[in-house]
Amino acid sequence: MSELQTNGKPTKEPWLILVGAGQAAWALGLALLGCGVRVQQVIARPNGRGAALAQRLQAQWVPWKTGEPIASAGPNDPDQPRLTLLAVSDDALQEVASSFGSDQTDALVHCSGTRSLDDLGGHPVRGVFWPILNLSKAIDTPWTGAPILIQTDHAWLEQTLLNWAHRMGAEPRVVTEVQRQKLHLAAVMTANFNNILLHWGHRLTQDLGTHRDLLPILAQQLNEFKQNSQDPLTRQSGPAWRGDQRTLDTHLHLLQEDPEGTALYRWFSSLIKRLHHQYPT
Ligand SMILES: NC(=O)c1ccc[n+]([C@@H]2O[C@H](COP(=O)([O-])OP(=O)(O)OC[C@H]3O[C@@H](n4cnc5c(N)ncnc54)[C@H](OP(=O)(O)O)[C@@H]3O)[C@@H](O)[C@H]2O)c1
């Protein structure tokens, strides 16, 4: 047990133990290392990307199969606090967390937008560190000014996570579980779903060899969303909103060899018509 637990607050900066070697593990590991956090170990499944990540983070590589004992977890110095960040698939969280008791780590944290603090099981010091960003091994993460939502019942863990997020250049905020889950739902519906629509924009402009003609209208929309706190429906336009049936028919004709695009177009257009009907003019 480290000084972190006996005194109730950290006397030393915790070392990081990172579990997982996917997109979030790479992005968060590199960002935390870059702002001076010592990454002690990378623990991940034997045949995955863990060895490469450990090497990149100058950390010890611990291959581990879920459910089996962890070969070597924790530093030799009993006074050195350890914080374990689980960057594994949401569905694997409970199972993976059950292997990390207070003898393995002083604090257990996950980085999921929706999964509960309770998914970390009975560990006495639990937290969530969720960046509202797309994380990827391949693309540099724009941390500056990005929100990182923090949830924990422990003041010292809250201070550590706030400190780390500030050092990354992000804008951390302490939230409740329900606030975080609602923001995750909003992020999925706006960014994740929107990427599918961008995919159609890309496909439909393939003949032109570029999708750049769509950039000004998309930038205009994003800028209005940024500047204006009103409901974006106040700025809705397009054939379904106006009720221009012949234009809708032409678009459906153009999509006739694309059943998924047709289904998407029909569904969105009928939704827009219903919203227009309900919308106070
Ligand atoms: N990517 C994002 O944009 C993003 C953003 C914010 C938060 N997050 C959160 O970050 C966490 C990880 O997501 P990700 O995008 O990094 O996923 P990912 O790229 O699919 O990586 C998932 C990792 O979990 C490991 N894993 C899966 N099942 C496991 C099990 N049963 N036992 C042990 N390890 C297991 C995988 O191991 P293998 O390498 O062996 O397959 C892999 O290392 C999730 O909680 C997610 O909600 C992701």
Image (tube, grey):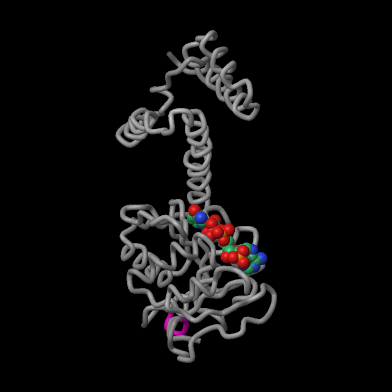
The quadrant in which residue 79 appears is bottom left
Residue 43 position, x and y percent, is 56, 75
Taking depth in this image into account, of 98 and 244 the one nearest to the observer is: 244
Residue 41 forms part of the magenta stretch? no
Answer above or below: position of 185 versus 176. Answer: above
Question: Which residue does the image show at 38% across and 71% down from the upper left?
Answer: 33
Answer above or below: position of 258 versus 199. Answer: above
Taking depth in this image into account, of 123 and 32 the one nearest to the observer is: 32
Residue 34 position, x and y percent, is 34, 69
Q: Looking at the image, can residue 121 be seen? A: no
Specify the quarter for ligand 1: bottom right
Residue 45 position, x and y percent, is 62, 71
Answer above or below: position of 258 versus 104. Answer: above
Taking depth in this image into account, of 7 and 172 the one nearest to the observer is: 172
- In this view, the residue farthest toward the right is 67
Q: Viewed as shown, does residue 188 lie left or right of 222?
A: right
Q: What count of labels does the image hold? A: 0
Q: Main secondary structure of the magenta part?
A: loop
Question: Which residue does the image show at 64% across and 58% down from the upper left?
Answer: 91
Q: Quadrant of the C terminus?
A: top left
Q: Viewed as shown, does residue 19 lie left or right of 38?
A: right
Question: Which residue does the image show at 31% across and 53% down from the upper left?
Answer: 145
Q: Viewed as shown, does residue 138 lie left or right of 99?
A: left
Q: Looking at the image, can residue 208 be seen? A: yes
Question: Which residue does the image show at 54% across and 67% down from the upper left?
Answer: 21
Residue 7 forms part of the magenta stretch? yes
Which residues make up the magenta segment?
5-9
